[in-house]
Amino acid sequence: MSEVILFDLDGTLTDSAPGITRCVQYALRYFGIDEPDTEKLKCFVGPPLKEMFMEYADLDEAQAEEAVVRYRERYTEKGIFENEVYDGIPELLQLCREKGRALGVASSKPQVFVEQILEYFDLRKYFDVVVGAELDGRRTNKAEVIEEALRQLGCEKNRHDVLMVGDRRHDVEGAAACGLQCIGAAYGYGGREELKQAGAVYIADTVDDLRILAKNFPRPSWRNFRLRRELLGQRTEKKTVKPEDDLMSQIPLKSKIWRILKPMLTYDIILFLVTYMGALLLMTFTGMGGLEDRLYRTSALMTGIACLIAIPLLWKQMQKDEGMFTMQRHQWNVPTAMACVLLVMSFGHLLNTFLNVTGFTTFFNGYTQLASDIYEGQNWLLLIVTIGVLSSVAEELAFRGMIYQRAKDFWGAGWATVISGGLFGLYHGNVVQLVYGMILSVLLIIVYERTGTLWAPIAAHIGENIWGLFRGQLMEWLRGHLPGAGTTLLLAEALICAAAFWYLFLYGRVENRRRERKKDGK
């Protein structure tokens, strides 16, 4: 479980509905709207008030702002104290602190009210930071509140160490916009269905269910130990951490090396054993062909079987690193996914063409013969499933999901890129794919860092592998039917590569500048 936990206030820590709904009634009466049923007004608990007044009562922006003013007239005097802490919350917070968690509050309620409520109910002592909206209307959006809490905690680059807890879809969506996962508090005002549809990773029906937040890690997470020490240093006004106190530097080098190599060795050993044992069994029971011939004929099938064995083991290894990673999750949607796939597919083919044109592949002519022997006569559907999909997933779990992330945690992104790329190239076992694999690994890491999700390099790797299986045949067919088709395809791939790169890395900056100019009236 995460080392840093952000809580919503209303509906998560306190049952604030009585005070909020009565104040909403008070504000609506100013506009001649009488709503005696406070149950209907519980939708105001959690979301920003201005937006809710506009949505619920069909007020325009100016009227909604006036409604907020009227709401606060009553809230500051009475409503703020028409509130109570959910049973078990103080004990939960105390347990989390005893387990070393750093806690914060991220609420859309004005910060002055949040602080006052926490002090009144003696909850403020549990939290490292408390962030709310501003009274002038700034920072009411949940994502903006969470971003400010991350900034104050120093977790902007350590978002995988942070978890949000809230009771409404705004909490889940705000967390997702900031690259965080969110646990839903179904005992609050949103309900299980709303939280499930919004994408909560876990739904707590009771406060007791939230004790999962205090669950210990299955093994040490060195990044979290360091983060916890830094947060403790902030709380005790120790602004610096001495090098000898940095737990990361105390990990023995051999332990670091073992953690880096373990994923690749796991996959390699399984692949080796399954491939050779499968070939030996077939040779023994069929009596046809030698070992080398059987290895070639069964390579695709045995690779698929090995991947089916390796993927769950690699996934389990990676799950033990939960909370260790320092990825910053960005936008991940269908256009971004397509851009990642097209970028790696087109770049991979252009790189392969470059290696062929320069004579690099012919210089190491054994590579061409090896590739021909492995793929010749194999079922095309089997190749897609095993080489295209399963091996791509296994390799990304091992090389980007663990090797890169672990090396990055130990020595930074630069050395992690070199180590992951070098091992990925060596894993392929020949000089041509060593060079190809190292270069492609860098691109996959760039895609990974850009999106913050392992699904990006997995999808891109699958697309590149499938395209690589059949692009040679397509090129030959085009050359035989359309003059200059090969050159045209290469130009098209170059344009696709450039367009995908522009969309992933430049489009967002251009759009942000355009919005800023529009906002400034320029």
Image (tube, grey):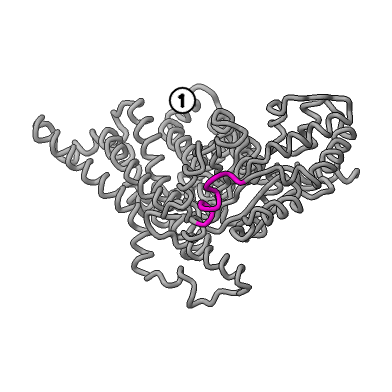
Give the x, y percent position of residue 209: 47, 42
**As rendered, which of 445 and 11 lies closer to the eye?**
11
Magenta segment, principal secondary structure?
A: helix
Is residue 106 rendered to the left or right of residue 478? right
Is residue 45 rendered to the left or right of residue 227? right
**Is residue 91 rendered magenta in the image?**
yes
Magenta segment boundaries in residue numbering: 85-94
Circle 1 is placed at which residue position?
Answer: 477
What residue do we see at 74% from left, 52% from top?
111
- Asked which quadrant contains residue 295, the reply is top left
Q: Give the answer, above or below, for where 35 lies relative to 209.
A: above
Which secondary structure, mark 1?
helix
Is residue 218 rendered to the left or right of residue 456? left
Q: Give the answer, above or below, for where 288 lies relative to 3.
A: above
**Disc 1 crowd, CA 10 A, few/some/many (<14, 14-19, 20+):** few
**Is residue 245 rendered magenta in the image?**
no
Q: Quadrant of the C terminus?
A: top right
Q: Give the answer, above or below, for where 33 lies relative to 118.
A: above
